[in-house]
Amino acid sequence: MAQASGMDPLVDMEDERPKWDNKLQYLLSCIGFAVGLGNIWRFPYLCQTYGGGAFLIPYFIALVFEGIPLFYIELAIGQRLRRGSIGVWRTISPYLGGLGLGCFSVSFLISLYYNTVLLWVLWFFLNSFQYPLPWSTCPLDLNRTGFVQECQSSGTVSYFWYRQTLNITPDINNTGTIQWKLFLCLVACWATVYLCIIRGIESTGKAIYFTALFPYVVLTIFLVRGLTLPGATEGLTYLFTPNMKFLQNPRVWLDAATQIFFSLSLAFGGHIAFASYNPPRNNCEKDAVTIALVNSMTSVYASITIFSIMGFKATNDYWRCLDRNILSLTNEFDFPELSISRDEYPEVLMYLNATQADRLAQLPLKTCHLEDFLDKSASGPGLAFIVFTEAVLHMPGASVWSVLFFGMLFTLGLSSMFGNMESVITPLFDMGILPRSIPKEGMTGMVCLVCFLSAICFTLQSGSYWLEIFDSFAASLNLIIFAFLEVVGVIYVYGMKRNIFPQERRSSTQAGCRSPVYSCPSCPHCGSHQLLWLIYCTSTDRGGRIHIRKVV
Amino acid sequence: MLWLLLFLVTAIHAELCHPDAENAFKVRLSIRTALGDKAYVWDTDEEYLFRAMVAFSMRKVPNRETTEISHVLLCNVTQRVSFWFVVTDPSKNHTLPAAEVQSAIRMNRNRINSAFFLDDHTLEFLKIPSTLAPPPDASVPVWIIVFGVIFCIVVVAIALLVLSGIRQRRRNNKGPLGVEDAEDKCENIITIENGIPCDPLDTKGGLINDGFLTEDERLTPL
């Protein structure tokens, strides 16, 4: 039934359905969707935590066995069935329509809070056009004799982030008021998103040239700059040196699999939507491998840049720690200025410990080790808004680097937003929710307006707590369940149909798109709900191949 | 006799000015940090200048206009360069209250700093907090300006796209109507001009046959 009803819309869609102007737009859109903020601030953190270069092994294994097959499934069914996520799953089976609806809802929720992160990035971007940068000094207190107490205890960057930007309340129960600065940035963000998706892939396809390629330009600039900074090589060697004993920890493998999963933006429905605008005979197998590899290479490339700058920051902090100690000693014992160099410091300390230990004990001296500073890692918004902004302060020409960095983050996030919004808009168009008389611009405008109104809650003072809730609960577990059901749907349900209607004509394999999955009727592991086991199962050839055939 | 006087003077000096004396302040200079290669050596002439600056500051205080350089005593100069100083009253028996000295120094901190090419950070008066200069405040914050520019561009672009979309749709709606008019014309022409083939689809953009032009001129437009 589903197959029979799939016939007419397929013919109609051939004529009416928008198309990509060229293959490059499609590839860039998928790459832009996959390459997002997580490549910058999640992957380097994982690399650092799990033994540097050793993490690449589980990462690439997960890419080959989990990432590429799942990605291939999505591109294949999107391209062949030429509908958005809801339509595709309804076509495979009417009972699977809920899966599409689930992907649609998750994409909607993720759009809300993902754009909120973008508005924070935009706020920092706007504030970078001044020198000195506003997070370099604390504001003065009322007497003008010193700095604000809160700022002195927390540090200038944290103060700027938590107080001047978010104005955060102590806990989530105090909602506080709407921050009008963030509200304005929210308006600007949603207006920008609307501008880029106003006509669906017609407008997205033009905007993607800039938003997908600009981050690579900036990453290269930062790489060159980062490698020439002092301390970069120490950072790179320390953070990339493989430590194989981490591989024995099962957590590493789980995190690698999770990272690949979310990095490729699987189970959102966005790739299905993008692929549905492709010509049916496009070679989606090659596309899947290309895009997945580009995404992973971008992660590694970005982590080289990030590590070199983190190495610079750690070296800087280490030097400042030493200098503070040296200044304390100089002031206390009245040595001539600049008489103790950083290298001489340990000997001088030992000498003073031997001769004047009591006076030395009263001084607030901290132990400074470079490894301690290198070990300080951060991920997520903390990396971008606190650690990196502080690193940028010490680079000459700080404003330029800040503008470039936050501009790069904004375009990275924007290209991911295109995929999110497309996975919301394409099913709405396909289902024909609104009458055809309403133009496409009106439809996208209404979707953006609804998202904007819903996202106002993130501009409250407690907004970042709400964002953490959304991030933890809206996305992670739901997407894994949906991906599991996707695989089950394509293997069993689609495969089951083949058994149910064996007299159906089998067309020859479509020249472009072969199904990557193999039937697995007796897989012993399939009883469990572990997605990884299922992927392992599907990767081995246990039976005949299923072709995604032409519908009757 | 002279020796005795000298001895007395130094004794009094030592009594009034010594580390942690009453109303005494410690000063610390970081000349090499501030000036690098252009750093000058701290000698007795520089000390004289310092005493002059302190006396100058005290003269600005009401009731202290008669302060002389000799009233400012320096002691315990170290290699760091740091020393202690006190300001005595004209009788040279008592030191002036710390509060007065503090307020005088704060008022003239800028002049004292610039006399030595230093700033608040490199010429430190311990226990005298300096009034920090407020950061230069633009009347309109910079971020609002940039935001305004970006937002205006985005709004204008959206308006242009929407308007061009509306215009496109109107043109598409008119297009099929134009074809129908030409077909009516063609039928009329055929009925009027027996058997003359009509090429109504001007949308083809095909060739214009000159032979038909004269015929058309004789026909009255509908």
Image (cartoon, grey):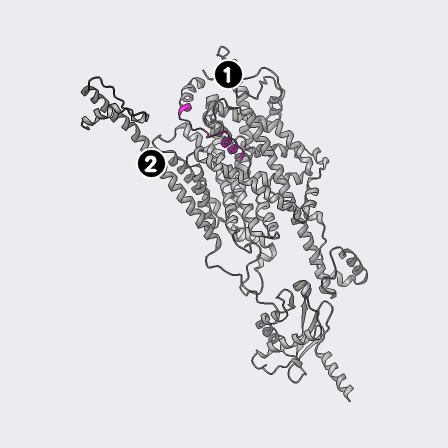
Magenta-colored segment: predominant secondary structure: helix
Give amino acid for label 2: Arg
- Is residue A188 inside the magenta stretch? no
Q: Position of residue A243 (x, y in %)?
A: 72, 37
Residue under label 1: A497
Residue under label 2: B167
Q: In the rendered picture of this protein, how many numbered marks are placed on residues? A: 2
Give amino acid for label 1: Lys
The answer to whether any part of residue A530 appears in the image is no
Foreground: A376 or B204? B204
Report in which chain the residue with disc 2 lies. Answer: B
Query: Between marks 2 and 1, how big is the CA–CA gap?
Result: 48 Å
Q: Are marks 2 and 1 in contact (CB under 8 Å)?
A: no
Residue at 63 percent across and 35 percent down: it is: A255
Residues packed near mark 1 inside 10 Å, few (<14), some (14 to 19) or many (20 plus): some
The answer to whether any part of residue A330 appears in the image is yes
Q: Position of residue A165 (x, y in %)?
A: 52, 51
Q: Position of residue A171 (x, y in %)?
A: 54, 48
Q: Residue furthest top?
A: A503
Residues packed near mark 2 inside 10 Å, few (<14), some (14 to 19) or many (20 plus): few
Q: Position of residue A411 (x, y in %)?
A: 51, 41
Foreground: B65 or A128? A128
Residue at 72 percent across and 80 percent down: it is: B13
Foreground: B62 or A282? A282
Residue A399, compared with residue A541, is above or below; it is below
Question: Which quarter of the figure is the C terminus of chain B placed in?
Answer: top left
Boundaries of the magenta span? A13-31
Q: Position of B116 compared to A339: left or right?
A: left
Dot 1 falls on a residue whose secondary structure is helix
Dot 2 falls on a residue whose secondary structure is helix
Q: Which mark is residue A536?
A: none
Question: Which quarter of the figure is the N terminus of chain B placed in?
Answer: bottom right
